[in-house]
Image (cartoon, rainbow, N blue to C red):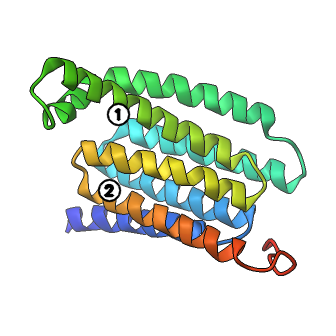
């Protein structure tokens, strides 16, 4: 029952992330993204995955700051710079701390030491790029910009989880990717005078 409870929390987080991009409002997108991240924070606590928990918790703080600034008509420019720098440093520290896992993932794909190193470095860079993309995306007010920058971010996570043989991760990110593309098509196909941002 304990394991089932943990998985239910994860599926709730996935659902919140998928739903988030279906809105055409910065506030609503960020609200559901933040709720999704908080859900994963709770799951990571139960799993003892402290690095993931810390990164998602920081993401929640970032989302709240970005949303507040957009609602007040303030620029997120310097906050984007700050959180991008922080994300980069945290990503590098995480890569160093979990390097053995990255090597382990790579060894599932090749026995050649050079290829293993290349794969490990590549997926490490991909994970940082994915986090940086979402940090930049959430700093914008436009829901269209948020969705469009989220598309390559989701694609990066699909590749990362595929290499890591995380089937649940691949399914999650593919569903988020499809949801984002569907939402973007849905809103861009409407006549411009009918596409009104939700409040």
Q: What element does badge 2 sit on?
A: helix
Q: Position of residue 186 (x, y in %)?
A: 64, 76
Q: Which of 24 and 15 is in front in this view?
A: 24
Q: Residue at x 79, y 40 (%)?
A: 76
Pointer 2 local density, CA inside 10 Å: few below 14, some 14–19, many at least 20? many
Q: How far apart are marks 1 and 2 (CA)?
A: 14 Å
Residue 9 in which image quadrant: bottom left
Label for residue 197?
none
Residue for badge 1: 123
Q: Where is residue 188 in the image (x, y as percent from the top left)?
A: 71, 71
Quadrant of the drawing holding the C terminus: bottom right
Is residue 116 visible in this depiction of the protein? Answer: yes
Q: Where is residue 191 in the image (x, y as percent from the top left)?
A: 80, 80
Q: Where is residue 126 in the image (x, y as percent from the top left)?
A: 42, 35
Q: Residue at x 12, y 22 (%)?
A: 112
In screen coordinates, is 18 left or right of 98?
right
Q: Residue at x 60, y 66 (%)?
A: 21
Pointer 1 local density, CA inside 10 Å: few below 14, some 14–19, many at least 20? many
Q: Earlier in the sequence, mark 1 or mark 2?
A: 1
Quadrant of the drawing holding the N terminus: bottom left
In screen coordinates, is 138 left or right of 169?
right
| Residue 115 versus residue 4 in the image, above or below | above
Q: Nearer the viewer, residue 9 or 94?
A: 94
Q: Which residue is drawn at 63% across and 44% down?
A: 61
Q: Residue furthest right?
A: 73
| Residue 106 versus residue 138 in the image, above or below | above
Residue for badge 2: 170
């Amino acid at each position: 029952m304990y394991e089932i409870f943990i998985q239910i929390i994860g599926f709730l987080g996935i659902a919140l992330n998928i739903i988030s991009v279906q809105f055409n409002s910065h506030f609503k997108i960020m609200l559901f993204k933040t709720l999704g991240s908080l859900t994963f924070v709770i799951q990571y606590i139960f799993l003892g995955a402290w690095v993931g928990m810390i990164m998602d918790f920081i993401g929640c703080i970032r989302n709240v700051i970005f949303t507040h600034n957009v609602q007040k008509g303030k620029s997120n420019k310097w906050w984007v710079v700050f959180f991008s720098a922080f994300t980069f440093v945290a990503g590098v520290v995480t890569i160093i701390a979990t390097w053995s896992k990255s090597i382990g993932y790579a060894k599932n794909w090749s026995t050649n030491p050079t290829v293993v190193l290349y794969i490990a470095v590549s997926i490490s860079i991909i994970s940082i790029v994915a986090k940086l993309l979402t940090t930049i995306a959430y700093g914008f007010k436009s829901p269209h910009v948020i969705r469009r920058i989220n598309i390559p971010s989701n694609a990066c996570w699909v590749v990362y989880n595929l290499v890591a043989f995380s089937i649940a991760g691949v399914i999650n990110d593919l569903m988020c990717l499809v949801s984002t593309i569907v939402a973007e098509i849905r809103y861009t196909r409407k006549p411009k005078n009918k596409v009104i941002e939700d409040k």
